[in-house]
Image (cartoon, rainbow, N blue to C red):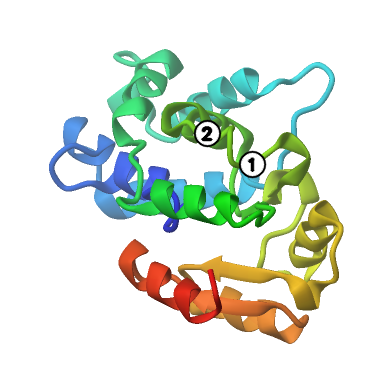
Amino acid sequence: MGGVLAHDVWEHLLLDPERGICTQFSLDRDQVERVGELLWQRFDYLPETGGTNWQVLEQLYWQRFIDCFPQQLSSVTSPSDFINLTEDFISPVEGMIPILERLQSHGIDLAMCSNNNEFWFRRQMNKLGLHGFFSPSKVVLSCRIGVSKSSPGFEMYQAAANALAIPKTQCLFVDDREGNIERARVVGMHGILFTSAQALAISLSEVGL
């Protein structure tokens, strides 16, 4: 999702020098980045449960963030304030929807493999209108698997192949991080490093797509 289909949420939402939370609320950038990393590690491996849906997780995330800045934020903000800001920082990577449409027209089955939490994933899917390309059974998220794509066990890659019900050698894996592409190739997938939609379209054409 992040870096290929949509621009990353948390880095821009928290750290954008013009509109980010650290600027809007005059917070120390280094501290905001540290808190963002800590919360990422916590919530990107935390699934929904029977009594805790994605909306509750989102509220908990922002309450934890506020608690990390008690002097600056606790008396002037609520989780809802930050949730309302989130939508402004969800934006598509230009040119990717036509590529998804093109792949579907070729009969290619699509799966998503993303280091992501439940609430930003839901907001990204809804705002960008991606439900028509990725069925729920073909979405693999770190918060649901319990590990990221960098895990030495390669669990997310296997889960993606399982979701498509094909061998890993028949999977074409696209990611904006070179390390993830290398790991995909280790397990037998074909890998394309994403730099832009235009470059991806050329790479897909070279393999007949």
Q: Residue at x 62, y 41 (%)?
A: 43
For residue 105, side relative to residue 190 (left or right): left
- For marks 2 and 1 on the same chain, the one whose residue lies earlier in the sequence: 2
Three-letter code, disc 2: Met
Residue 90 quadrant: top left
**Eyeballing the image, is 70 above or below 15?**
above
For residue 118, side relative to residue 72 (left or right): right
Residue 137 or residue 39, whichever sits in front: 137
Q: Position of residue 129 (x, y in %)?
A: 47, 31
In front of the other: label 2 or label 1? 1
Q: Secondary structure at mark 2?
A: helix
Q: Position of residue 82 (x, y in %)?
A: 37, 23
Residue 149 or residue 26, whichever sits in front: 149
**Eyeballing the image, is 189 above or below 142?**
below
Give the crowd class for mark 2: few <14, some 14-19, many >=20 residues within 10 Å.
some
The label number, if any, that marks residue 134 in the structure image: 1
Q: Position of residue 103 (x, y in %)?
A: 55, 56
Q: Residue at x 35, y 62 (%)?
A: 197
Three-letter code, disc 1: Phe
Q: Residue at x 53, y 50 (%)?
A: 38
Q: Is residue 204 visible?
A: yes
Q: Position of residue 100 (x, y in %)?
A: 50, 51
Instruction: Identify the residue under disc 2.
Output: 125
Q: Is residue 152 visible?
A: no
For residue 115, side relative to residue 16 (left or right): right
Q: Residue at x 65, y 52 (%)?
A: 110
